[in-house]
Amino acid sequence: MQEKRRSRRIDIDLEGTIRFQEAKDMRVCVIRNINEECAGVMIVTSDPRVCTMECLNLVIIIPAENSPIKCAGKIAWYSENDDPFETNIDYAAGIFITDISRIDRRRLELLLAQKRAPFGVGLRYAWH
């Protein structure tokens, strides 16, 4: 089978929240990976609403930063887990990012650059 993705995915495993545009409540999710163009993310969640292919708001929580990355997107695909007791994952979904500020996009690009770099390469140390 031929790979359809145009860009590589970077494993990230960050906490986040999703809020469907027609709903008022927010649900916890895990951001598993982000494509290197920052145009799509894969999440896992226990919320069955990801199967509705709706638009949603996504908040990505970055450890050690004061403000999260916020964006909007549309569910491009979803997958329901056949055996959630084995993996603790009920649903996985791919989200195509439709709206993100320039600042948050840059923050996401920097985060991915850190994840791609070998340990210690390109990182600044605070010791003098």
Image (tube, grey):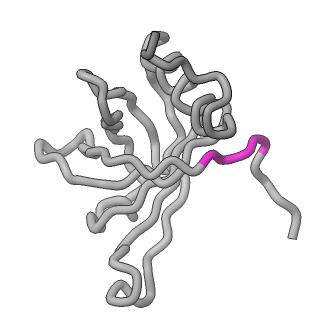
Quarter of the rendering occupied by the N terminus: bottom right
Q: Position of residue 104 (x, y in %)?
A: 43, 18
Vertical order, 21 against 67 (above or below)? below
Position of 108 with respect to 21 (left or right) is right
Kindly give the residue lying farthest to the left in the view shown.
Answer: 24
Identify the image quadrant of residue 46. bottom left
Residue 82 magenta-highlighted:
no
Magenta span: predominant SS is loop
Q: Residue shown at 54%/40% (left/top)?
A: 96
In the image, residue 78 above or below residue 75 = below
The image position of residue 37, as x and y in percent, is 66, 31
What count of labels does the image hold? 0
Residues shaded magenta: 6-10
Find residue 48 and report its horizontal and vertical position in percent: 30, 68
Q: Is residue 14 left or right of residue 47?
A: right
Residue with the most extreme front position: 128
Foreground residue among 44 and 54? 44
Q: Quadrant of residue 117?
A: top right
Residue 38 shows in the view = no
Q: Position of residue 6 (x, y in %)?
A: 79, 43
Q: Is residue 61 visible?
A: yes
In this view of the protein, which residue sits in the foreground, 21 or 9? 9
